[in-house]
Amino acid sequence: MKATKAKVFPSPLTAFPIIFPSLCKILLGFLGCRSKYFKEMDLSGKMVRQVEIKSDGDAFHQIFRYKPHHISTVSPGKIQSVDLHEGDWGSVGSVIFWNYTHDGKEKTAKGIIEAIDEEKKLVRFKTVEGDLMQLYKTFIATVHVDTKLGGNNLVTWTFEYEKLSGNVVDPNSLMDFCIKLTKDIEAHHLK
Ligand SMILES: *[C@@H]1O[C@H](CO)[C@@H](O)[C@H](O)[C@H]1NC(C)=O
């Protein structure tokens, strides 16, 4: 004869292994939602990196301010051309168009020189068109040089950006690109 199982309400002890995993699942689901929510909210970022150069800090700034078109000669693998589209080289409001190769792809960036500070040896470039605009709502790159007593100069790159979505990664690889570019310019000037 088949034994029939009596339907009893599970005691707290026997119910625990059933209820506990479900509670965990609910809790993790909730936390997952929360972190996704925060990721989606936090789309703006700032990235700062510094690199010391042995070459002259003023010369470095002059290149970025007045002669960015010379960078394609200094670092042709990274920068293919830099063209002036509006205004004058070295002036606020001028519009500059960059052809560059990043992560093995040919890219472009059109941007406006938003700020120049001769004392801080600073140039701020706000992107208005190009590949970065596929990923970022805003992307501003600033480069400035601190000249130190004793010769060495500290170049600081700052990116301020707002991503278009939470899936966009931080611009680490573009920052690497700028640091390498800085080293190329340094090497060229030390020759
Ligand atoms: C720069 O990019 C534009 C647009 O993609 C292209 O037409 C032009 O040939 C490029 N110039 C160089 C020097 O790579």
Image (spheres, grey):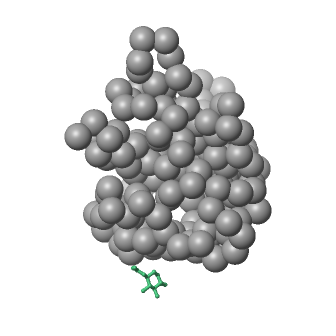
Residue 22 lies, with reference to residue 51, above or below; the image says below
State the image quarter where residue 191 is shown: top left
Which residue is farthest top? 150
Residue displayed at 32% across by 56% down: 74
> How far across and how far down the image is residue 177, in percent?
40, 51
Q: How many marks?
A: 0
> How far across and how far down the image is residue 102, in percent?
38, 63
Closest to the observer, 129 or 150: 150
Residue displayed at 40% across by 43% down: 182
Please state the quadrant of the image where ligand 1 appears: bottom left
Q: Is residue 131 visible?
A: no
Specify the quadrant that holds the N terminus: bottom left
> How far across and how far down the image is residue 105, in percent?
36, 72
Q: Is residue 147 visible?
A: yes
State the image quarter where residue 111 is shown: bottom right
Query: With 115 as the anchor, is 166 left or right in this view?
Result: left
Residue 62 lies, with reference to residue 97, above or below; the image says above
Residue displayed at 37% across by 32% down: 55
Closest to the observer, 110 or 71: 71
